[in-house]
Amino acid sequence: ALVMQGSAETHMAAAVKRAQKALDDMSGEFEALFAGEVAALSAAHAAFAATGGEVERRTFFRSAHDLRGSAATLGYPLAGRMAQSLSRLLALVEDPPPALVAAHVEAIRAIAREKVRDAGDPVGAALAEELDLHAERTIEPHETRSA
């Protein structure tokens, strides 16, 4: 049997403190991972914008989708929200407006460059909301056609 000295709350607080320290120690790795994903997204966007090919589109979509899934874990929830909007746009609209696609990518790059980690950042949140709105307005006619 396991015998513990002290209360369960004391042990839980110590475990949480150790976990937080481990996350803090890894934050530099998270920065590098996030920067790599943003660079991959930018490169995939450039290739897609240059050719418009199906292979480039799938690579670009996969990059946006991957970033959507990892951004919050890496500490960038607004970038994840923007990547989700971009992923939906690429998945549901055959020929998405290039300016709207580029706006998503540039917004994600700005989030990375400025290291905007707070989901409540007023400028970042307003930008994410605006991108969501424009993407949904673009997607809506395509969803009703396929339904």
Image: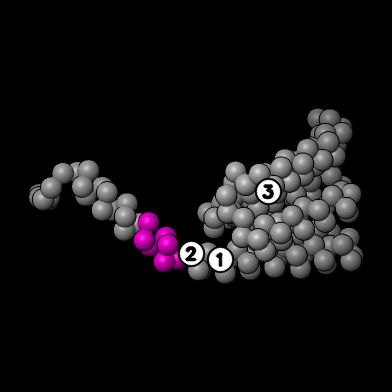
Name above or below for residue 97 compared with residue 115.
above
Label 1, secondary structure: give it.
helix
Amino acid, disc 1: Glu
Query: What range is drawn magenta here?
Result: 20-26
Give x and y (percent) for residue 93: 84, 44
Q: Is residue 3 left or right of residue 109?
A: left
Please give the residue where the numbered disc 2 appears in the rendered image: 27
For image coordinates 77% across by 44% down, the residue present is: 131
Q: Which residue is mark 3?
A: 124
| Discs 2, 1 touching: Cβ within 8 Å | yes
The secondary structure that most of the magenta stretch takes on is: helix
Colour pattern: one colour
Q: According to the image, label 1 marks what residue? A: 31
Mark 2 or 3: the one toward you = 3
The disc placed on residue 112 is none
The residue under label 3 is which amino acid type? Gly
Q: Position of residue 53 (x, y in %)?
A: 87, 61
Q: Quadrant of the C terminus?
A: top right
Separation (CA) of disc 3 from disc 1: 18 Å
Residue at x 48% of width, y 64% of height: 27
Q: Secondary structure at mark 2?
A: helix
